[in-house]
Image (cartoon, rainbow, N blue to C red):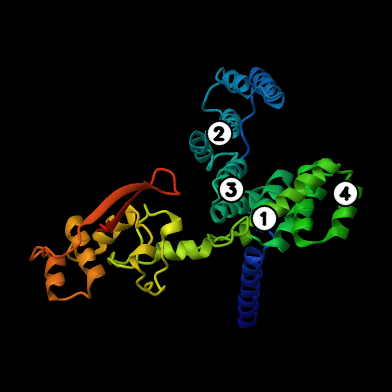
Amino acid sequence: MKRVTAMLLLAGSLAGCASNSVSESPWLVQKDASAPRSCEPLTADQELVLGLSQEMASAGRRHAALANLERLPSDVPQVRLSKARLLRVLGHGNEAETLYGSLLNSCLMADANHGLGQIEAARGRYTEAQGYLRNAASLSPANESIRNDLGVVYMNQRRLSEARFELLTAMELNENSRRAPQNLLALLIYQGDWQGARELVSAKGLSSDDFKRAEQRAQDMRSKETSAPTPAVAVQPLATPEPAGTAAAVASLAAPAAAPVRSAARAPAAVPATTRVPVAAPAPAPTPVTARAPVPVRDVAAASARSVTPIPLSVAARAWALEEAAPLDGAARQIRSGEQKPSASARPLVCRSTGASTPGLAVMECLPDEE
């Protein structure tokens, strides 16, 4: 008796280990113990309406197919499933999700899980989609459409070995289907298996358009892996080289502007280029009266503007006359500063306006009167 009990316990433990290994295996699906009951048979009219609706959907008339289904009772599981499939394809995922959810405990439990997995995959929620599709595969292991969609979800999760297994299973379950070979071709190109891709194209008779679409899908998968946001501080290179002097100009604009400083050596902008004197040039030596060049009025005005204490023109002329007659003494300095009038011994000045070589420029020439 003890020996029989020990054998039973050992058999139970081995069965438990096998069950756990099957449920955790990505290659095998565990048959659901709570398999749904069979659906009630449809009437002839219901089968006729469902068949007509399916033909309309296959021809692209999905709205008409959905309207045709309204003729049937809404509590029929096959009718709810057909409506859910049409709503999902038409982009009404929330309404389709409600109908699929109402079928989870019905005779169409596998199709309900399949539809919910498709909706979650379209939303990019691949973990949830994988759970629904694994349940659907456990309820209907030989369904080619379920195994194909599960393989696509594994591809999006980058679980490439599982994806390849599921796609091969789907392709062998239905040799006339083109969905599984096209998905498998994209997977082979993504993995860089060009030899396998060529063999698949030849074996399944895939077209060049199928190859281009598969190549584009593989490229999209790679771009999602390598794409990253560009840092805000990164400096993008210019499309064309910078012109000469651009860097210096930008640096000068970025430098703080210095406060303007008055300088006696800076020439005003109004002075012609021919009369400007370099800043570092030494002052010319005094020349005799007869050889003094006429001073343009603009230069005199500029010199007056640069002087710290401006002197009237008449006072400057009288001081110049005294300086020509004798060295500058205290009296002359007083006259130049406007503190004292010149003495009677100073020679009077005779000033006249003459033309200049520059058009539009008048020259005032002042010389001592010759007695």
Disc 2 residue type (three-letter): Gly
Disc 1 residue type (three-letter): Met
Given residues 5 and 18, the one toward you in this image is 18
List x then y, in percent, for residue 290.
36, 63
Q: Which residue is mark 1?
A: 221
The structure residue drawn at horizontal position 39% and vertical position 70%, both measured from the top left corner, is 279
Give the quadrant of residue 50. top right
Q: Residues at badges 2 and 3 in contact (C-beta under 8 Å)?
A: no
**Mark number, residue 91:** 2
Q: Which residue is mark 3?
A: 121
Q: Where is the N terminus found, in terms of image quarters? A: bottom right
Q: CA distance from mark 2 to mark 3?
A: 13 Å
Q: Residues at badges 3 and 4 in contact (C-beta under 8 Å)?
A: no
Given residues 216 and 287, the one toward you in this image is 287
The earlier-in-sequence mark between 3 and 1 is: 3
Judging from the image, what secondary structure is the residue with disc 1 in? helix
Given residues 307 and 217, the one toward you in this image is 307
The earlier-in-sequence mark between 1 and 2 is: 2
List x then y, in percent, for residue 86.
60, 30
Q: Residues at badges 1 and 4 in contact (C-beta under 8 Å)?
A: no
